[in-house]
Amino acid sequence: MKIGIVVGTRPEIIKMSPIIRECRRMGLPYVLIHTGQHYSYAMDGVFFKQLELPPPQYNLNVGSGSHAEQTGKILMGIEPVLLKEQPDVVLVEGDTNTVLAGALASAKLHLRVGHVEAGLRSYDRRMPEEVNRVLTDHCSDFLFAPTTQAEQILREEGISKDKIFVTGNTIVDAVFHSRMLARNHTHVLEDLGLRKQEYFLVTMHRQENVDDVESLQNVLRGLRDVHMKFDLPVVYPVHPRSSKKIKEFGLEVPGVQLVEPMDFLGFLELEQHARVVLTDSGGVQEESCILGTPCVTLRQNTERPETLAVGANLLAGTYPENILNCTTEMFEKKKDWVNPFGDGTSGKKIMNILQEKL
């Protein structure tokens, strides 16, 4: 059995790392294809090194561009690689343009597709990620759902139960593995002059938030209000897209400490010891839930409703008053919820299923 593994962004590298390790442990041949959707070393290359992963055999170097341009470049670049390598199954993870293009190219070549983290839905088609994950689910042969709720969503959309496997989420495997590495390899709190439980951590990069001047301005005002009320640092490792838009719109960020994008181990350390995380990232909602850090989501919806159900997360949207109110509620939140995303053996479960079926 030969496995094709397609990644293109930081979250995909992280969430595919347990599968790559399992392939190596089992002695299975695999081909690792990086589309280059995240194209700077700080945003992706460093993660291979920190997570102790081998470099990809192929890098398509597609870079940035419109959704059509990026998806088209990946389709054109990945097809000859798949034709040459002929994997028995191609694994994609998540909801990016890399995921859709990797799945579509494979399906067109009659190669079997496995979608890791299948069945997530925000039910907001304005989000390009929602379109990507729906289409990927419906052209996949193996759908690895992280929870029974995701499984139910897939069944309700008419996908055969024979294609769906509840495995938990590989992010749990990755966080458990990387948390130990972070203790010995990073001093980010000391470097930023922070104390455990005495700062807020922010991430924001989604198109609907940072490309809209009103939404971006509202969130920054909300962060300012959080800083003023609690008199604690608000640390924002700013995504290049967000940094560009803040400058383009001429916005000020009083009370917010803008820092460079973090490598995974450094960011994990910040997440683990923050008082509250404020984010528009689905992956960060998962990570903070697993780490026991209260989360406030800067969106009106989430494709991770399990985090809401267990009490680890609140939806605040982008209005300053709601951001402050939700942060105030989560500030005193007891960290007594149960992680709903599995026991840290998802990578092993996925590979065992593929071995059995193929």
Image: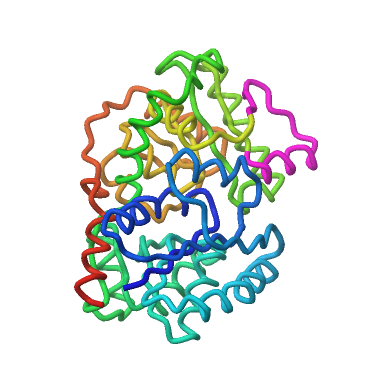
Indicate the quadrant containing the C terminus: top left, top right, bottom left or bottom right: bottom left
Q: Is residue 244 magenta?
A: yes
Q: Is residue 50 magenta?
A: no
Nearest the eye: 201 or 5? 5
Above-or-below relation of 159 to 170 = below
Nearest the eye: 26 or 319? 26
Looking at the image, what colour scheme do you see? rainbow
* Residue beneath the point at 63% across and 28% down: 259
Above-or-below relation of 135 to 252 = below
Say which quarter of the image contains residue 174: top left
Indicate the quadrant containing the N terminus: top left, top right, bottom left or bottom right: bottom left
Above-or-below relation of 333 to 91 = above
Number of marks: 0
* Residue beneath the point at 23% across and 67% down: 165
Q: Which residues are magenta?
A: 239-259
Residue 224: x %, y % from top left = 61, 25
Residue 31: x %, y % from top left = 45, 65
Q: Is residue 250 left or right of residue 315?
A: right
Nearest the eye: 41 or 28? 28
Nearest the eye: 43 or 334? 43
Above-or-below relation of 240 to 228 = below
* Residue beneath the point at 40% across and 29% down: 182
Say which quarter of the image contains residue 72: bottom right
Q: Is residue 80 left or right of residue 291?
A: right
Q: Is residue 180 left or right of residue 260?
A: left
Residue 273: x %, y % from top left = 40, 23
Residue 313: x %, y % from top left = 36, 40
